[in-house]
Image (cartoon, helix red, strand yellow):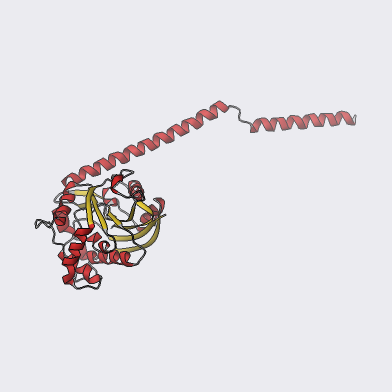
Amino acid sequence: MASVLEGRERKHKQSYQDTIAQKKAPRHPCRYDYIRGLLMHLEAERRTMEDKATENGVAAMAACYQRFDPSAYLQYNYTPPRADFDRKDSIVPWKLACLHRAFTEGDVSGKLLVDIGSGPTLYQVLSGCEVFNEVVLTDFLEVNRKELRRWLQGEEACSLDWTPYLQHVCKLEGRRPSAWTEKAAKLRRAITDILPVDVHRPQPLDPRVLPPAGADCLVSCFCLESVSPDLAAFTKALGHIQNLLRPGGHLLLIGALGESFYFGGPGVKIPVVPLDEAEVCASLKESGYTLIRLEVYTLPQDMRVGVDDVTGVFFAKARKD
């Protein structure tokens, strides 16, 4: 009798184990494969739609810039009160001090400095030309490249007199302000080219213009956030310009904080990605940079002159991983 009961118990136990195993096993492998494939398809479709939206946004940004007026832009942003060299709290002297300090700390060095999105301005390379023998200026717009060429060729028809800027940087370097003519000559010798650039392309510059390893240093001021439709595009652009930089090379980045628009000429309202400090740091990290230093300037009320809605400016010094 005992053996009969033991046999029944073993049979019941085996039946129970078989039931559990059946529950654990997928009943319809084809159906699961179908669902997995459908989810992958939907994800690919979502990414395609996002890429298309970004592409449309970039095209819209490019269209905004077709009426950009270099002369008006310079008058709006690079004359007093924003460029008052007698005031320590003026925005332009603050930017020049950040750049001077970054270029003279000893870790930024090499042969080639590339300025990404120069616009019609020169201030961002005034300290750099003392460190780098070769400087390349770049911009998306021909009108800005034309403005830069005017100064490079010594034409009198420039939209802004850069003499006060040169004099101020000479002071920062411990030289007489009268040495500005020597500095201007040195910068003209250092500038080897003025090229078109598109930061929304994986390779923003023609690769033939750079050494195989890349540039030693990049500087970029008020460019990426001003030509990107959203934060994702800004971050992607940071990654694109990283492709131009050698491993261990430096990026000196200046940009606007809390800005949603600026005027690029009379009636030319251009949208801007309104960044905060945390977003700048996160975007740099995501794009393959190690942040060395972040500095922030808050605009005094009298610097808010109605040509934009910027609340502050950041300076970031970073190194390519």
**Which image quadrant is residue 185 in?**
bottom left
How far across and how far down the image is residue 133, in percent? 27, 59
- Seen at 55% across and 26% down, the residue is 30
Tell me: 91 left or right of 230: left
In this view of the protein, can residue 204 be seen by the observer?
Answer: no
Count of labels in the image: 0
How far across and how far down the image is residue 63, in percent? 21, 42
Compared with 308, 208 (above or below) is above
How far across and how far down the image is residue 18, in percent? 71, 30
- Seen at 29% across and 63% down, the residue is 131
- Seen at 47% across and 33% down, the residue is 39
Compared with 130, 243 (above or below) is above
- Seen at 18% across and 66% down, the residue is 182
Q: Quadrant of the N terminus?
A: top right
Tell me: 41 left or right of 130: right
How far across and how far down the image is residue 259, in percent? 27, 55
Compared with 6, 115 (above or below) is below
User: Quick one: 25 or 202, which is closer to the camera?
Assistant: 202
